Amino acid sequence: MNPEALYRALIDAIPMDLRVLDAAVGASHSIVVTGEGIGTVMTLEPTGIQPRLPPDLRGMPLKEVAEAVLSWNAADAALGGAALNAYYNSPVVLNKHFRYVHSSQESLSSNVDRTGQRAFRGSGGTEADPFTRYAELARGKQVASVGHFASVERHIAPVAASLYIIEEHPQNGDYPAAAAEYLLPAMDMVFITGSTLANKTLPRLLELSRHAFVVLVGPSTCMAPALFSYGVSALSGTLYTDREGCLSLVRQGLHGKMVHHGQKLNFEKGV
């Protein structure tokens, strides 16, 4: 896999005329807002590289901010990832790629989009939550999760033959990040936190997981169908629609409450 080709495929699809309305780097999450979408990504740990983005992103082309996902400065990379999400995780683009129609009254259902991807959508329930949706697929399988999610322990651990949790900051029983090189090639199913796109570990993790059913998961997930071509089997992310509510929570460091301003979505690669 050519890692830069993956990023270029995502960046180059963003129109030049889209502009940033607001942006912020919070203690736990970073956010970029346009007139059409809201994107968030987990704020990354600082690096020694100086930033290239200006302090105020308002009015900048979204595509230019998205380019910063390739930066080795942590704040730039998180904002770049959030810019990608502001584009791909917007109602207009989700409709374009998956024929998804946002409606708070819409019940969980599935459909087939124009390129053959099946889209499972909803505000909650088994169709939208990846850990309940894929529990049966995980039954009796070798499963790994890159990122520690409480739900993976709750729903996947009881049915999987083995569950390996790989974390940069391991909790009791977790494996360190370096274990991915040894564990992932033997897995049947792998859940990968969406923040790995911004921290640039995703291309290697996908290479290591090329024989597995891979779910990119969490509110940092970029719901871009191009990722299906690089080994992702399912995209499980969040559509945020309350601009001011999300900005306020990010600035306060209260990202956990953003669930009230979002809708879980799951898009699965067509067969």
Image (cartoon, grey):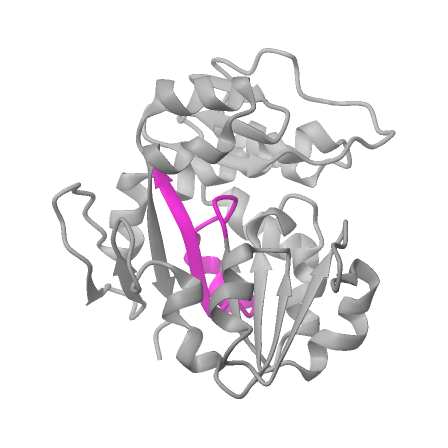
Residue drawn 65% across the image and 57% down it: 202
Above or below, 165 relative to 68: below
Q: Quadrant of residue 24?
A: top right
Q: Is residue 183 visible?
A: yes
Q: Residue 5, position in %: x, y?
A: 63, 56
Residue drawn 55% across the image and 70% down it: 231
Above or below, 74 relative to 165: above
Residue drawn 39% across the image and 38% down it: 259
> Quarter holding the C terminus?
bottom left
Q: Which residues are magenta?
A: 218-240
Q: Is residue 162 left or right of residue 232?
A: right
Q: Is residue 20 visible?
A: no
Q: Nearer the viewer, residue 23 or 259?
A: 259
Q: Residue 195, position in %: x, y?
A: 60, 47
Q: Is residue 97 left or right of residue 105?
A: right
Q: Residue 170, position in %: x, y?
A: 76, 54
Q: Nearer the viewer, residue 247 or 231?
A: 247
Q: Quadrant of residue 66?
A: top right
Q: Is residue 65 left or right of residue 129?
A: right
Residue 221 sits inside the magenta stretch: yes
Above or below, 36 relative to 11: above
Q: Nearer the viewer, residue 106 or 15?
A: 106
